[in-house]
Amino acid sequence: MKIKLISFCLVTLLLVPALSSAITLQHSTIQQGFQNYLFNNDSSFDRLITVLLKIGHYPSMSACIINNTTIVWKKGYGFYDMEQQKPANEHTIYVIASVTKTITSTALMQLYERGFFQLDDDINMYLPFILRNPNFPNDPITIRMILSHSSSLATDPLAYHWFNYSHPPPIPWYPSPWLEEYLLPGGVFYTPEIWDATHRPGEYMQYANINFDIVAYLVQLLSGQPFYEYCDDYIFTPLGMIHTSFRLPDLPIDDVAVPYLYENKTYVKLHYYQLLHYPIGGLMTTVDDLSHFLIAHMNHGIYNGTRILQNDILPK
């Protein structure tokens, strides 16, 4: 049961629905709960997950356990549409938030594999504008730094999250010219706080979503395709991820989890929405589909006989 629990927790971390709000759980509370709970059968395990969902105010969740190349267990918990009492299952479609970045980085690494760039290339070799930290204007920013959150782009300011867009891609002004207006001094959306004033590029890792807006833009520039189309052609279709998309209109809406906000001790139903920054957190998928992607990464880049990355690329 310990193996099952560890595997379950790993996959659950990837698949907990990001559309719901949650409270921060005290470490001591969770630790005590696990110490006092005996996972001696599936029923007790199910009860624990149900309790944790209630504590965290998540309406639903789907999860699976993978052994090598096979799903050995999958299950849904709660209702993904509370008004219609639709129970979650392996076919429920969730927005997977920042797990999207694993797709985005895979797309760029496919182009690396095909010889389009080197990881330590100055990013300005490929961008149509010059990107430098104004505090360290002589220090190049490499593609490796962008991928590893060590580019000296600082934690996203609150203003980054104000930008939203209610329509699916393609978006006429994203990623360009939006990126230029956000990243470059004098831009309409520019604020100096987006850049680290203390650490040079490559010196320090700090998580900033904007790095992966740039990664997606590189995919688009190097491949000559819109980012979402590239992912369809080179990741989702080869892996048989038929219920996965950056575009809500391309998915069966009846299977998409309804977004909720938990406030005043109740769940408030929200409208379906799309993200402007869809390459950093806007992918919609199912536990079944995402398992194909995970299996490929667990098995040297191969899922069901189809290779999406060479084995020697994965450690990079």
Image (spheres, rainbow, N blue to C red):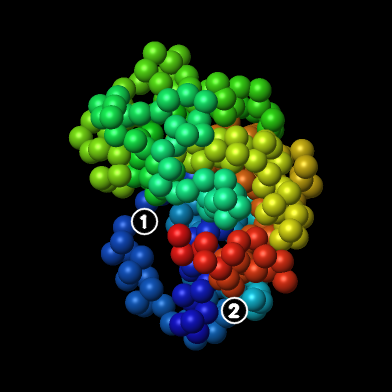
Classify mark 1: helix, strand or loop.
Answer: loop
Image coords of residue 58 (percent x, y): 53, 53
On screen, 184 above or below 218? above
Note whether 36 is above or below 213 in the view shown: below
Q: Name the residue carrying label 1.
A: 25
Residue 85 visible in image:
no
Residue 146 x/y as whole percent: 42, 42
Q: Helix or strand or loop: what does disc 2 sit on?
A: strand
Viewer-nearest residue: 287 or 139: 139
Q: Residue at x 77, y 38 (%)?
A: 249
Of mark 1 and mark 2, the one earlier in the sequence is: 1
Query: Which quadrant: the C terminus?
Result: bottom left
On the image, numbered disc 2 is attached to which residue? 67
The amino acid type, in three-letter code, at marker 2 is: Asn
Residue 183 place in picture, x, y as percent: 42, 25
In this picture, residue 308 sits left or right of residue 129: right
Q: Quadrant of residue 152?
A: top left
Residue depicted at 65% across the width and 69% down the height: 302
Q: Is residue 83 left or right of residue 38?
A: right
Q: Residue at x 44, y 29 (%)?
A: 160
Nearest-to-viewer mark from 1 and 2: 2
In the shown orientation, is residue 223 left or right of residue 163? right
Q: Position of residue 100 (x, y in %)?
A: 56, 49
Disc 1 and disc 2 in contact, CB within 8 angstroms: no
Q: Nearer the viewer, residue 116 or 255?
A: 116
- In this picture, is 35 found above or below 278? below
